[in-house]
Amino acid sequence: MGLLVMNSSVSCLSPPSSPSSNKYYRFLSHQFNSNIRSSSPSRLLMMSSSSSSGAATHHHRHRSSTTTTKELVGNTKITFCYGRSGEATIEKTHSMAPQKLEIFKSLEGWAEHNMLMHLKPVDRSWQPSDFLPEPESEEFQDQVKELRERCRELPDEYLVVLVGDMITEEAIPTYQSVMNSLDGVGDETGASLSPWAVWIRAWSAEENRHGDLLNKYLYLSGRVDMKQIEKTIQYLISSGMDAKFENNPYNGFIYTSFQERATFISHGNTAKLAKNHGDLKLAQICGTIAADEKRHETAYTKVVEKLFEIDPNETIQALAATMRKKIKMPAQFLYDGQDDNLFKHYSAVAQRLGVYTAKDYADILEFLVGKWGVEKLSSGLSGEGRRAQDFVCGLPLRIRKLEERALERTKSRSSIDAIVPFSWVFGREIEV
């Protein structure tokens, strides 16, 4: 689930279409990038939207001092955020052209027949209690004892990754809120019967079981500091998530296609490791969660596939823009009250154990490019669309090269510098 984000450009604006707007956009970009160039390395780290290091510090300690100004460029709202020390970030919202709303309205019938089929009725769904000791049973204490004996063999580094995955799953209120912020597909009333809204609520309900189950299992294991974990969950939900969707459903569905496949891979790998460590019940749990993620991935990728079919030019540009901004993991604002670089450290452990790696990031993109037939797109593309197509198709190879260099740099680091304490496992030190 975690990811070592590879940083490049911090620009987060895409030029509007009209000449006058383009001129204004260039001015905004110049002002923003000038601010960046004049910043110290530490301030640049705080400003970069694609940097995971320092994100928690920025979000938890500087947010209250931020003031904003807003400008409208075309149909897009751009918000400038200035912190106490003068650093600036730019937030772009409602970037989808208003006429595109009709596309999603026209797809409601399609969504009803092609998305909702990937949901399971509640009475046929698994529940967390199916995998846990039965509190009503006279054998409850013996069942808990067996669980704790199995968990005794799990190494701390595995527990750190499992906890990180669980905390990420527990932040489902944030993800539901973000999906409902997408123009044209959100739940406008809280109980809308639109197929898009029905999907978001039911998807959230299915996902809610994941964190619930892992949380209870870890609690009963006695191997982790639940107070620190609970604080981290509260911090994460209150911090929100900055996925750079711009309220744009093209961006949102591309992101969720990528993210659901990432969680499928991550939970699948934690299942394999649990089996290797002798906890077959935990392996079953992680495998069951991975199967849910696979169903959800199928639904989201079908939406993007449909968008490529009916609006290839907009969709390929959205895909390119999403990849330029990087796929931000949902837990990017991880914070436990102690470690300002908790997400970075958790991601490093996940990378080292092979639970989720930069190679997986490239593999997912390559998989989606193939599934959506991006390389074969030939008609309906503008010049900008073709440039976006070239960028996306060449990106997996570029990511792999960057990862090779990152691995070489990692090998040259001192091992002493790569040991950090994790509050989730009572402050015990873990190699990152």
Image: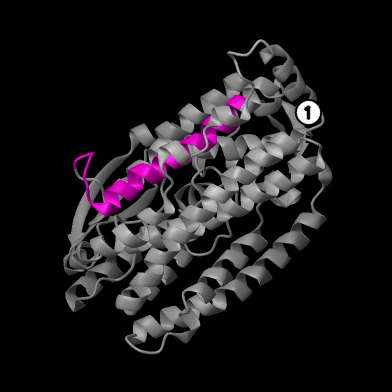
Q: Quadrant of residue 113?
A: bottom left
User: Who is closer to the viewer here, 191 or 52?
Assistant: 191
Instruction: State left or right for residue 410 relative to residue 82.
Output: right
Q: Is residue 21 above or below residue 154?
A: below
Q: Is residue 380 left or right of residue 243?
A: left
Q: Residue 398 in the image: x percent, y percent?
A: 61, 73
Query: Majority secondary structure of the magenta segment?
Result: helix
The residue located at (18%, 66%) in the rendering is 102
Q: Nearer the viewer, residue 20 or 204?
A: 204
Q: In which quadrant of the rendered image does the C terminus lie?
A: top right
At a point 63% along the width and 50% down the height, the residue shown is 266
Mark 1 lies on residue: 150
Could you tell me which secondary element the residue under label 1 belongs to? helix
Across and down, in percent, residue 421 comes to 71, 31
**Spot occupied by residue 301 in the image (x, y as percentages of width and height):** 44, 64
The number of numbered badges drawn on the structure is 1
Asked if residue 212 is among those painted magenta in the image, a careful observer would answer yes
Residue 267's place in the image compared with 11, above or below, is: above
Could you tell whether 41 is left or right of 250 in the image? Answer: right
Amino acid on which disc 1 is placed: Arg
- Res. 78 in view: yes
Q: Residue at x 29, y 53 (%)?
A: 196
Q: Nearer the viewer, residue 171 or 404?
A: 171
Q: Residue furthest top?
A: 138
Residue drawn at point x = 45 percent, y = 53 percent: 49
Badge 1, how many Cα within 10 Å: few under 14, some, many 20+?
A: some
Residue 418 showing in the rendered view: no
In the image, residue 130 above or below residue 387 = above
The answer to whether residue 60 is above or below residue 200 is: above
Percent coordinates x, y for residue 100 in the rendering: 21, 68
For the magenta stretch, what is the residue range?
Answer: 189-216
